[in-house]
Structure formats: structure tokens, C-alpha cells
């Protein structure tokens, strides 16, 4: 699924775009930055809300370059039949779990650890969305990464607009949150 024939890969990450509820399009600044940095893959952790957003990413970056999971607000029948709830895969020697997430934002990492029994797993990286808050931290040897949301609304659950990057090679994982 993820080609690792290069020395390293760069992944652009976004989540919780909620289009058209919050805006009409994916922010050009994010897509332009992904293009400028020449990302190898684009990961989306769900809550597209419309299949057209998924199609736009594929049209822009290519079908083999977009990796996505379904979020709790992805009621669109095409999203439901196309996207899984979670993905597990390897990137180089790192085992990755990608999912949308669940519950409120305040104890999301504790909740993920408990509900998914992550302390007894061999995951190195857990990528998620759902909370609309960026997360870039290591706990119990696992990198937890949430790029936040590129389309915030003014409520208690949204801190700021953001997206992210993971640069991965055999030797290391570098993670970055970009604030808009």
C-alpha cells in the first residue's frame, strides 16, 4: 500500500474538513503546500462529509497517493462503501494504525490506548483525527499524531486551523504540525 522504495517519504496529513458544512473547498493554502513540498502521500483521517472532497484529493494527487479512513460524520454512501473505519500498515519498519477517533477531545490519547489496547500492541505510530485539535506527542513509545482541522468553527472544540506532515525513513520519524 505504501511504497517505500525511496530513502524517505513525506506524507501530508489532514482531517475533519467537514465540507460543505464549514467551507466550500479544501483550503488552497494546504493543497499548494502539499504540492510545493512534493508530498509522496496525502492521508485524510475522515469527516470529509462529501465524496467530492475525497475525489478532489485523488484528482489532485493521484489515486495511489491518497490514503483515507471514514469518520463519524461521513454518512455519504460512497464514502461508506469506499473507505474503511481504520487501516493498519507498515511504513519502512514502523507499524501504523490510522483511524478517525472517538469521544471528546480532552483525554483522546488515554481513550485510544484503553479502547484499542495499545499498550499491548506493536504500533509505532497512531494517526487520528476527530477532536479538531492537533496532537503531536509520544506516549508509551507510540507517536500519536492528529493534524487537527483545516476548517475550524468558532466553538469550544476547535482551537485553530492546522494540518501536518510526517517524514519517515528507515532511521527516523519526523512529525510537524502546521498552523494556519
Image (cartoon, helix red, strand yellow):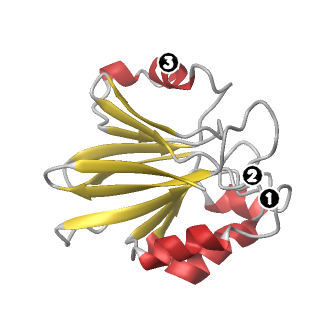
Q: Quadrant of residue 156?
A: top right
Residue 74: image tag: 2
Q: Quadrant of residue 119?
A: top left
Residue in view at x 47 percent, y 25 percent: 116
Residue placed most toward the observer, 150 or 107: 150
Asked which secondary structure carries label 1, the reply is loop
Q: Position of residue 26 (x, y in %)?
A: 69, 68
Q: Can I make out residue 173 in this image?
A: yes
Count the marks: 3
Callout in the foreground (2, 3): 3
Asked which secondary structure carries label 3, the reply is helix
Q: Position of residue 91 (x, y in %)?
A: 28, 55
160 to 27, vertically: above or below: above
Label 2 vs label 1: CA separation? 6 Å
Disc with the residue nearer the chain's start (3 vs 1): 1
Residue placed most toward the observer, 89 or 147: 147
Q: Are marks 2 and 1 in contact (CB under 8 Å)?
A: yes
Residue 124: image tag: none
Residue with the mark numbered 1: 76
Disc with the residue nearer the chain's start (2 vs 3): 2
Q: Can I make out residue 70 in this image?
A: no
Residue 110: image tag: 3
Q: Position of residue 17 (x, y in %)?
A: 70, 56
Q: Position of residue 163 (x, y in %)?
A: 54, 54
Label 2 vs label 3: CA separation? 24 Å
Q: Are marks 3 and 1 in contact (CB under 8 Å)?
A: no
16 to 82, vertically: above or below: above
Amino acid at each position: 500500500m505504501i511504497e517505500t522504495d525511496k530513502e524517505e517519504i513525506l506524507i501530508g496529513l489532514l482531517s475533519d474538513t467537514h465540507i460543505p458544512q464549514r467551507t466550500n473547498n479544501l483550503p488552497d493554502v494546504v493543497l499548494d503546500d502539499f504540492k510545493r513540498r512534493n508530498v509522496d502521500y496525502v492521508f485524510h483521517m475522515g469527516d470529509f462529509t462529501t465524496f467530492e472532497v475525497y475525489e478532489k484529493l485523488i484528482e489532485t494527487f493521484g489515486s495511489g497517493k491518497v490514503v483515507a479512513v471514514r469518520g463519524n460524520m461521513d454518512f455519504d454512501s460512497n464514502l461508506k462503501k469506499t473507505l474503511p473505519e481504520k487501516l493498519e500498515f507498515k511504513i519502512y519498519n514502523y507499524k501504523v494504525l490510522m483511524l478517525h477517533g472517538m469521544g471528546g477531545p480532552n483525554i483522546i490519547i488515554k481513550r485510544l490506548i484503553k479502547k484499542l489496547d495499545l499498550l499491548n500492541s506493536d504500533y509505532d505510530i497512531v494517526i487520528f483525527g476527530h477532536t479538531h485539535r492537533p496532537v503531536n506527542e509520544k506516549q508509551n513509545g507510540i507517536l500519536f499524531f492528529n493534524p487537527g482541522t483545516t476548517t475550524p468553527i468558532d466553538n469550544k472544540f476547535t482551537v485553530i486551523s492546522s494540518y501536518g506532515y510526517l517524514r519517515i525513513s528507515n532511521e527516523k520519524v519526523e512529525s510537524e504540525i502546521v498552523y494556519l
